[in-house]
Amino acid sequence: MNRTQLVNLIKQKQSLLCVGLDSDIDKLPACVMDTEDPVFEFNRAIIDATLPFAVAYKPNLAFYESNGVKGMVSLQKTMAYLNNLKTQCFTIADAKRGDIGNTSQQYARAYLSPEGDFNFDAMTVAPYMGSDSVKPFAVYPDKWVVLLALTSNKGAMDFQFIKNESGLRLFEEVILKSQQWAENLMFVAGATQASLFRDIRKAAPNHFLLVPGVGAQGGSIDEVCDNGLTNDYGLLINSSRNIIFADNTADFARVAAAKAEEMCSQTQKYF
């Protein structure tokens, strides 16, 4: 999905919502556990319920890889389902990969290639190893590299705020430097760091930001929007647990839809 298509999808749905499919098998409602593939059945129900309100879905690969072959089959089924809805949603592989050379090429091929089993629109990538760990992900037309920049976890303070000789913090240097490597970049910017979004916008005034940390981690949607919106929106605001695990009964999908609609309504004033 290219930028124009993504922006049009946001306008059409009047939504910035990305639903994180962090489908932890230990937290799934009992009503899906007797099915052949509980994770896929759960995901399908969540997708069907939230699709009117969500512009993107973000499976976190850890929750699939941890279940071995069965988990990867669940992911493949989920992506086949989402790819049948290709014009209605954007998809992100939350993989946080970051290696060099042939290894990055193979990660990119696995998750971004249109001929592969998954065919995501975008993939999260760690920039620590530099340009040759990022460029291999940027070779697929209309696919996106979502680069970790300013994250919402406590450990972000360990490295991301270290200043160089020019006074730039590491997250700012990552954002500025990486724009020399590829055009099809987005950046991860945690909602708990929303007070710094104006600084991020100085470094990347027009790039899309993927924003985790709303909800369970305490990030403010209004603060994110007030500091991070661009003329063509430029934000995908992720919520995972607050939506998909809002209810643990047979009514889980309806409750997830209500939570997604509620979150969507909080951004309506920006359209």
Image (cartoon, rainbow, N blue to C red):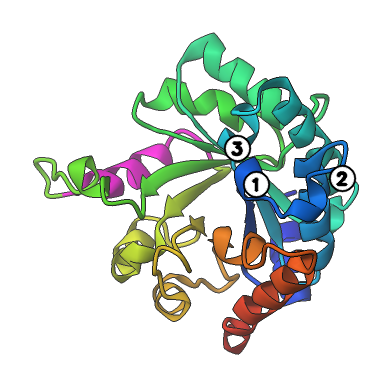
Q: Nearer the viewer, residue 232 or 60?
A: 60
Q: Reply above or below: 34 against 99.
A: below
Q: Position of residue 2 (x, y in %)?
A: 72, 50
Residue in the picture at 65% in, 28% down: 67
Residue 209 in the magenta stretch? The answer is no
What distance separates the C-alpha of mark 2 from that of mark 1? 15 Å
Q: Position of residue 145 (x, y in %)?
A: 56, 39
Looking at the image, which residue sits at the far top? 102
Residue placed under numbered mark 2 in the picture = 81
Q: Secondary structure at mark 1?
A: loop
Q: Secondary structure at mark 3?
A: helix
What distance separates the C-alpha of mark 3 from that of mark 1? 6 Å
Q: Position of residue 222 (x, y in %)?
A: 45, 81
Q: Nearer the viewer, residue 91 or 218?
A: 218
Task: Answer whether labels 2 and 1 touch (C-beta < 8 Å).
Answer: no
Residue placed under numbered mark 1 in the picture = 23
> How many residues crowd around disc 2 within 10 Å: few (fewer than 14), some, or many (20 or more)?
some
Q: Give the residue type at disc 2.
A: Tyr
Residue in the picture at 85% in, 56% down: 87
Q: Earlier in the sequence, mark 2 or mark 3?
A: 3
Q: Secondary structure at mark 2?
A: helix
Q: Give the residue type at disc 1.
A: Ser
Q: Earlier in the sequence, mark 2 or mark 1?
A: 1
> How many residues crowd around disc 1 within 10 Å: few (fewer than 14), some, or many (20 or more)?
many
Q: Give the residue type at disc 3.
A: Phe
Main structural element of the magenta stretch: helix, strand or loop? helix
Q: Earlier in the sequence, mark 3 or mark 1?
A: 1
- For residue 271, say whether it is visible: no
Read off the magenta span: 168-182
